[in-house]
Image: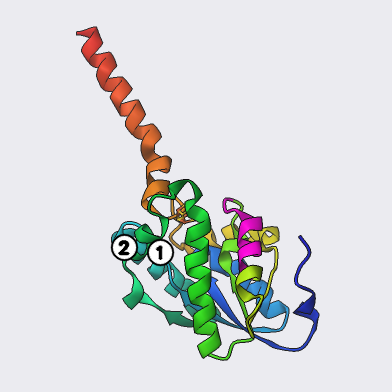
Amino acid sequence: MAPDATLKEGPKRVLLHVCCGPCAIYPVEQSRDQGCEVTGLWFNPNIHPLSEYLRRREGLLEVAAKFDLNLIMLDREYDPQVYLREVSHREANRCFHCYSLRLARTLSVAKRGNFTHISSTLLYSKFQKHDMIAGLGRDLCAKSPVSFLYQDFREGWSQGIKKSKDWGIYRQQYCGCIYSEYERFSKELAEAVSENEAEKGSV
Ligand code: SF4
């Protein structure tokens, strides 16, 4: 997918939705290199449990300190029910609704804050549904004074990972929601059950 053509036009005030510290590194660097003035927006009610939310939040604060990055922290809006109601009974398509929830909130903050563009660090991850995020961002902004600034941040995947490791930033084991946590660790449960059954069988 081609980068946003408007990148070459004048300065931009970009509100960058941030999903975590490691994923913010390359998008912030890249956007600044393109002449954008970047502010990060932390709004992720999808993250489960709260202890994980707090760890990722801390990682973001560490990255922001390295970059002297301004952040808008919507911690008071952290409520798992907000996310769960959004995806309830449509879990098979949950990522669409999860992206939509976060990007729509980003857009509403951007409008109030006179930002010219929004974007998201979700465009950095090789594990996210990249085209879906780009399409959603464009659709949400279609009739808005705020534009969606598309960039394929996946190009900086290795660069961002290296820096996050060098800086010792917390790196998560799963995407964020309770479903993704289950998918990530369910293999361990299956192995534990098999071992247990094998032990019983050998008695
Ligand atoms: S897997 Fe990730 S993007 Fe999809 S719903 Fe869960 S937290 Fe959101």
Give the image quarter of residue 42.
bottom left
Residue 124 highlighted magenta (yes or no): no
Q: Is residue 175 above or below residue 100?
A: above
Checking the image for residue 56, the label placed there is 1
Q: Is residue 113 above or below residue 83?
A: below
Q: Is residue 63 above or below residue 95?
A: below
Q: Nearer the viewer, residue 23 or 3?
A: 3
Q: CA distance from mark 1 to mark 2?
A: 19 Å
Circle 2 Cα neighbour tier, 10 Å, few/some/many (<14 / 14–19 / ≥20): few
Residue 200 percent location from the top left of the image: 21, 14
- Does the image show residue 66? no
Circle 1 Cα neighbour tier, 10 Å, few/some/many (<14 / 14–19 / ≥20): many
**Rendered residue at 19%/8% (across/down):** 203
**Rendered residue at 43%/48% (across/down):** 91
Q: Nearer the viewer, residue 170 or 49?
A: 49
Q: Main secondary structure of the magenta part?
A: helix
Give the image quarter of residue 16.
bottom right
Instruction: Give the residues drawn in magenta, as a range.
Output: 127-137
Please tell me whether mark 2 sits on a helix, a strand or a loop: helix
- Identity of the amino acid at label 2? Gln
Residue most toward the left? 203
**Rendered residue at 30%/28% (across/down):** 192
Disc nearest the viewer among 1 and 2: 2
- Identity of the amino acid at label 1? Arg
Residue 101 percent location from the top left of the image: 47, 67
Residue denoted by label 2:
81
Residue 5 percent location from the top left of the image: 80, 74
Q: Nearer the viewer, residue 185 or 101?
A: 101
**Rendered residue at 31%/62% (across/down):** 81
Q: Nearer the viewer, residue 108 or 59?
A: 108
| N-term-proximal mark, 1 vs 2 | 1
